[in-house]
Amino acid sequence: MDQIDRKLIAILQQNARMPLKAIAAQVFLSAPAVSARIEKLEAQKLIQGYHAEIDQQKLGYHIVAFISLELSAQQKPEFYPFIAECPNVLECNCVTGVYSMLIKVAFPSTQELDRFIGQLQRFGNTSTQIVFSTPVPHRDVVILPEDGS
């Protein structure tokens, strides 16, 4: 991955719908050359998808929460398929500490969140934090220079 690829990734993080011609002008390449580079980055799985940023509250998801879950290693084969099928789970991370899973969820109500926590507790103890506000929303990864500094 060279400096042009890094610039392409940075541009696409900002606006994945930017026309190839506009991207090409920023990196001083032709549109076909930019298209080929993007396809290569996708094939290498450096670019894993393109997503729309939405307002969850306008869709009725007024409750966002982080749930920490104690999970033993023996439960992972049962837990992973379960959690992957839960549509309200936005993200699930295996983490260090007392709780081994950190799960971000969105629900229309606290009652639905409570029912979900009840389902999770068959796997282990939980601790839940409901989000009041988000002073730093999701943001892009900083693209490091080639030397990694």
Image: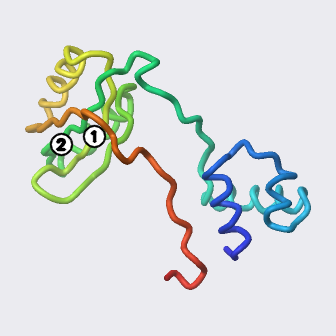
Q: Is residue 76 above or below residue 25?
A: above
Q: Secondary structure at mark 2?
A: strand
- Judged left or right of residue 105, residue 141 is right
Taking the view exactly as shown, the residue that stands out farthest to the bottom is 147
Tell whether label 2 touches label 1 (CB within 8 Å): yes
Q: How far is mark 1 from mark 2, CA to CA? A: 6 Å
Q: Say which of 74 and 9 sits in front.
A: 9
Q: Is residue 103 above or below residue 141?
A: above
Across and down, in percent, residue 15 comes to 66, 47
Instruction: Count residues near mark 2 (Cα–Cα under 10 Å), then give few for <14, some for 14-19, many for 20+.
Output: many
Which quadrant would residue 28 be assigned to in this image? Answer: bottom right
Q: Nearer the viewer, residue 149 or 101?
A: 149
Image quadrant in which you'd find residue 53: top right
Amino acid type at mark 2: Ser
Q: Residue at x 24, y 55 (%)?
A: 95
Q: Residue at left 70%, top 68%?
A: 5
Q: Is residue 66 left or right of residue 84?
A: left
Residue drawn at (22%, 22%), measured in percent from left and top? 113
Name the residue carrying label 2.
68
Q: Is residue 54 left or right of residue 28?
A: left
**Which residue position is annotated with label 1?**
103
Residue 8 disc label: none
